[in-house]
Image: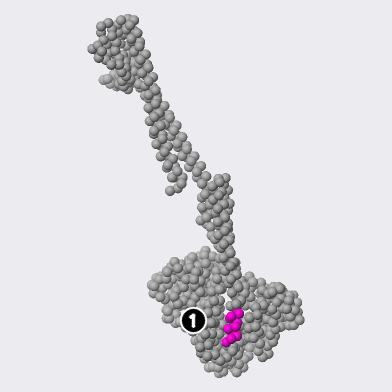
C-alpha cells in the first residue's frame, strides 16, 4: 500500500514512516502545505495521514481540495485538537477517520489498515491471514473451517494484532485500543495478560498456530509465521 | 447591625435627649415669663389697695373678682415681710357648674395660685394683705404651649424618621445592587458586573472600583487559562513524539530484562503525562463551557455500556458488582457524562481491594457509586481539589476535580460520604 504522511513534526513523521515501511508498503512524506498539495495533485495514495496545523496552510484545505477533485484517497486526520467540532468538521469534509495526538503507532496502523481495507476490498468482507478467516461484516472468526467464539473485545484485539502483525504492540496501546483512553488504568495492566491468555487458548483450541508472543514483558507480538 | 438602624438609633437617642433638655428649658422659660406677668398683676392690685387706703383712710371691701381674692388680717406692726408665694387658690363652683349638684361639701376646688403677701397701715392699725390670683389659666396656657410644641416636635421627629428610612433605603440602593452583583460574581463566567446607575459619587467610585477589579480578575484568570491551554497544547506534540519513538524503539529486538523494565516504566510515565495533559485541557474546556454538544442521554443505557467495558477488569480484580438502575435521562454532553462515569467507576475500581464490592444505584434523583476500600473516610475538603491524590494512587489527581466541574456544569452536585465499609460518591441531578 502507498501512504502519504503530511506532518510537520520531524520526529513524529520519521517514526510513522519507519513503522509503516515494510515489504509491499511505500511511504512518502510532506512536511508543509505546498509539498503536500504538490504530491496529492500528482500521485494517488491508498491512505493520506493528514496533520491539520501545517506550515504554509491548513490541513483542512488539503482535504477540501482532495474531495473537490474526487480523488479516492483515504484520509486519516491526525490532529492535536481534541475537540468535537474539529472532529465533526473533518469527518463532514470527507475524512475517513480522526486520530488525536498523541497516539500509539499501532493504533495508527490499525486505523489505516481499516481504511485501506474498506477502500480496496469493496464488497468483500473477508480478511484472511494464513488459517485465520475473519468475516468482517458478521464479525465471525474461523480457523480453517472451525468457528471460534470470541467476545467483542477479543475480536477487536485479534484484528488489532493482525493489522500490526510482526510488530511489538505495547500493553498501553492494547489497553487504550480496547478500553479507550478514558479508562485511566495505567497502574494496573494485569487484566490484559488474562485477556491475551484467553484469546490464545481459544484460537489454539480451534487448531490455530500460536501467533501471539509476549515481548519482553512490555507487550505482545503477532508473528507472521 | 445595618447602617440605617445604627444611624437611626443614634439619631433617635440624641434627638430625645436634646428634646428633653429643650423641653425643660422651654417650660422653665415660659413658666418664668408667665409668673412675672402674674406678679405684675398682683403688684398692680397692691398698688390699687394702697391708693384706696390713702384716699379713703380705710380698708377696701374684701371683694372677690374672677380669679382674684384679697384678704386682710390684723397683724403686729412690722411683722409682715413683703413676698411673692406659690399658694392655692380656692375657686367656688359656678352656680350652674354640674359638679355643684353632686353635693360637694367644699363648694369649690383648690387650684394652683400665685400670691403676694404685703402690708398696709390704716391709721394706727397694721394689716397683712394677701392677694391670691389663680394660676390655672397660666398653667393651662403653659401646658397647651408645651403640648403643641412637644407634639410638633414629635411629629417632626416621626416624619424625619420615615423620610430618613425611605430616603436612606433609596440612597443605599446602588450599594445593595453592587453587593448583589458581587455575590453573584463568578470568575469563570463571561457575564460582567453591570454599571450601576447612580448620581452619588461614593457609589460611582465603588462601582468603578468593583468593575475595574472584576475585569482585572477575569483577565488574569483568562490569561491563566489561555496559558494552561497553550502549554498543554504545546506539550501534546513532544508527548506524541516520545510515544511514537517508544513504539519504534520496542520494534528493535533483543532487550534484556533490565531494558524492558526501563521501557515499561517509560511507557507508564508517558501515558500518565499524556493523561494529565489531557485532563488539564479538558478542565479548561469545561470551565470555558466549550463543549456544547448537549443531548438527551439515557443514563441506564450509558452506564450499562460502560459496565460492559469494565467487565474484564471487574473479573480480573474479582470485584463483586451490584447495580440497580432506574430509568433516568439527563440533558447533557455525552462526552462529558462519559468522562464523569468513567472517572467515578475507575476510582471505585482503583481504590478497591481485591474481591471487594462496587454498588451502583441510579434513581430519578441521584446516582450513587459506592465501593469498598481503605476502611477510613477520605478528607472531604481535599479530595475535590486539584492534584490531591491518595498515597500510592497512579491517577492524575484531577479525576474528581473534573468530575465535580462536569457536575457543576450541568447543575448537578457531586458529594462524598463514608459509610463504613463503603466510600460513596453521589451525583444529585
- Where is residue B221 drawn, in percent x and y? 56, 63
- Where is residue A74 drawn, in percent x and y? 69, 80
Q: Is residue B44 above or below residue B353?
A: above
- Where is residue B367 drawn, in percent x and y? 48, 69
- Residues drawn in magenta: B240-250
Q: B175 or B304, which is in the foreground? A: B175
Q: Does the magenta stretch include residue B243?
A: yes
- Residue under the point 56% across and 46% down: B201
- Where is residue B146 drawn, in percent x and y? 40, 28
Q: Which residue lies furthest to the left in this view?
A: B76
- Residue under the point 64% across and 88% down: A126
Image side of residue B87 versus residue B185, left or right? left
Q: In this view, does A169 lie above or below B156?
A: below
How is the rendered protein coloured?
A: one colour
- Residue under the point 58% across and 53% down: B194
Q: Is residue B97 magenta?
A: no
Q: Which residue lies furthest to the front in this view?
A: B78
Picture mark count:
1
The chain to which mark 1 is attached is: A
Q: Residue furthest top?
A: B56
Q: Is residue B417 above or below residue B116?
A: below
**Quadrant in the picture for residue B33:** top left
- Residue under the point 70% across and 80% down: A30
Image side of residue B323 versus residue A8, left or right? left
Task: List the residue tagged with mark 1.
Answer: A188
Q: B32 or B369, which is in the foreground? A: B32
Q: A210 or B24, which is in the foreground? A: B24
Q: Is residue A3 visible to us here?
A: yes
Image side of residue B291 versus residue B375, left or right? right
Element at label 1: loop
Amino acid at each position: 500500500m502507498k501512504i502519504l504522511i503530511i506532518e510537520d513534526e520531524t520526529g513524529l513523521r520519521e517514526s510513522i514512516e519507519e513503522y509503516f515501511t515494510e515489504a509491499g508498503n511505500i511511504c512518502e512524506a510532506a512536511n508543509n502545505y505546498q509539498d503536500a498539495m504538490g504530491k496529492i495533485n500528482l500521485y494517488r495514495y491508498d491512505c493520506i495521514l493528514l496533520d491539520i496545523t501545517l506550515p504554509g496552510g491548513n490541513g483542512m484545505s488539503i482535504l477540501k481540495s482532495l474531495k473537490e477533485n474526487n480523488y479516492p484517497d483515504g484520509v486519516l486526520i491526525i490532529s492535536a485538537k481534541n475537540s468535537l467540532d474539529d472532529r465533526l468538521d473533518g469527518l463532514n469534509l470527507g475524512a475517513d477517520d480522526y486520530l488525536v495526538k498523541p497516539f500509539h503507532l499501532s493504533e495508527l496502523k490499525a486505523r489505516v489498515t481499516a481504511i485501506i481495507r474498506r477502500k480496496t476490498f469493496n464488497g468483500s468482507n473477508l480478511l484472511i491471514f494464513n488459517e485465520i478467516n475473519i468475516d468482517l461484516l458478521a464479525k465471525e472468526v474461523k480457523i480453517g473451517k472451525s468457528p471460534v467464539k470470541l467476545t467483542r473485545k477479543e475480536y477487536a484485539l485479534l484484528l488489532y494484532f493482525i493489522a500490526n502483525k510482526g510488530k511489538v504492540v505495547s500493553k498501553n496501546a492494547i489497553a487504550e485500543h480496547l478500553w479507550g483512553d478514558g479508562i485511566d488504568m495505567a497502574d494496573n495492566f494485569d487484566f490484559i495478560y488474562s485477556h491475551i491468555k484467553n484469546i490464545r487458548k481459544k484460537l489454539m483450541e480451534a487448531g490455530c498456530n500460536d501467533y501471539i508472543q509476549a515481548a519482553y514483558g512490555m507487550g505482545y507480538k503477532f508473528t507472521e509465521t | 447591625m445595618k447602617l440605617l438602624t445604627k444611624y437611626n438609633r443614634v439619631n433617635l437617642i440624641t434627638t430625645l435627649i436634646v428634646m428633653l433638655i429643650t423641653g425643660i428649658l422651654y417650660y422653665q422659660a415660659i413658666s418664668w415669663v408667665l409668673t412675672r406677668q402674674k406678679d405684675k398683676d398682683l403688684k398692680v392690685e397692691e398698688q390699687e389697695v394702697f391708693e384706696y387706703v390713702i384716699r379713703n383712710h380705710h380698708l377696701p371691701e374684701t371683694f372677690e373678682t374672677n380669679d382674684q381674692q384679697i384678704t386682710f388680717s390684723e397683724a403686729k406692726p412690722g411683722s409682715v415681710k413683703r413676698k411673692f408665694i406659690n399658694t392655692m387658690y380656692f375657686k367656688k363652683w359656678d352656680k350652674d357648674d354640674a359638679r355643684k349638684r353632686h353635693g360637694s361639701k367644699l363648694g369649690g376646688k383648690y387650684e394652683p395660685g400665685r400670691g403676694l403677701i404685703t402690708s398696709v397701715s390704716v391709721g394706727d392699725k397694721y394689716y397683712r394683705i394677701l392677694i391670691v390670683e389663680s394660676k390655672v389659666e397660666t398653667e393651662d396656657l403653659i401646658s397647651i404651649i408645651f403640648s403643641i410644641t412637644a407634639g410638633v416636635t414629635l411629629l417632626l421627629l416621626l416624619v424625619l424618621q420615615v423620610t430618613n428610612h425611605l430616603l436612606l433605603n433609596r440612597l443605599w440602593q446602588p450599594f445593595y445592587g453592587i453587593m448583589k452583583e458581587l455575590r453573584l460574581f463568578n470568575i469563570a463566567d463571561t457575564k460582567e458586573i453591570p454599571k450601576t446607575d447612580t448620581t452619588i459619587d461614593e457609589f460611582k467610585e465603588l462601582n468603578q472600583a468593583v468593575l475595574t477589579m472584576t475585569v482585572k480578575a477575569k483577565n488574569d484568570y483568562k490569561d491563566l487559562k489561555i496559558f494552561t491551554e497553550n502549554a498543554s497544547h504545546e506539550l501534546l506534540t513532544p508527548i506524541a513524539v516520545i510515544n511514537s519513538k517508544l513504539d519504534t524503539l520496542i520494534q528493535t529486538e533483543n532487550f534484556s530484562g533490565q531494558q524492558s523494565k526501563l521501557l515499561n516504566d517509560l511507557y507508564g510515565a508517558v501515558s500518565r503525562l499524556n493523561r494529565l495533559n489531557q485532563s488539564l485541557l479538558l478542565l479548561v474546556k469545561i470551565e470555558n463551557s466549550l463543549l456544547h454538544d448537549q443531548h438527551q442521554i439515557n443514563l441506564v443505557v450509558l452506564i450499562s455500556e460502560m459496565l460492559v467495558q469494565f467487565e474484564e477488569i471487574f473479573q480480573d480484580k474479582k470485584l463483586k458488582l451490584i447495580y440497580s438502575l432506574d430509568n433516568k435521562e439527563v440533558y447533557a454532553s455525552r462526552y462529558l457524562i462519559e468522562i464523569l462515569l468513567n472517572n467515578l467507576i475507575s476510582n471505585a475500581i482503583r481504590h478497591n481491594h481485591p474481591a471487594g464490592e462496587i454498588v451502583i444505584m441510579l434513581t430519578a434523583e441521584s446516582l450513587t457509586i459506592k465501593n469498598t476500600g481503605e476502611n477510613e473516610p477520605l478528607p472531604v475538603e481535599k479530595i475535590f481539589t486539584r492534584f490531591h491524590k491518595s498515597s500510592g494512587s497512579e491517577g492524575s489527581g484531577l479525576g474528581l476535580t473534573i468530575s465535580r466541574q462536569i457536575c457543576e456544569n450541568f447543575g448537578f452536585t457531586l458529594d462524598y460520604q463514608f459509610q463504613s465499609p463503603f466510600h460513596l460518591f453521589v451525583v444529585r441531578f
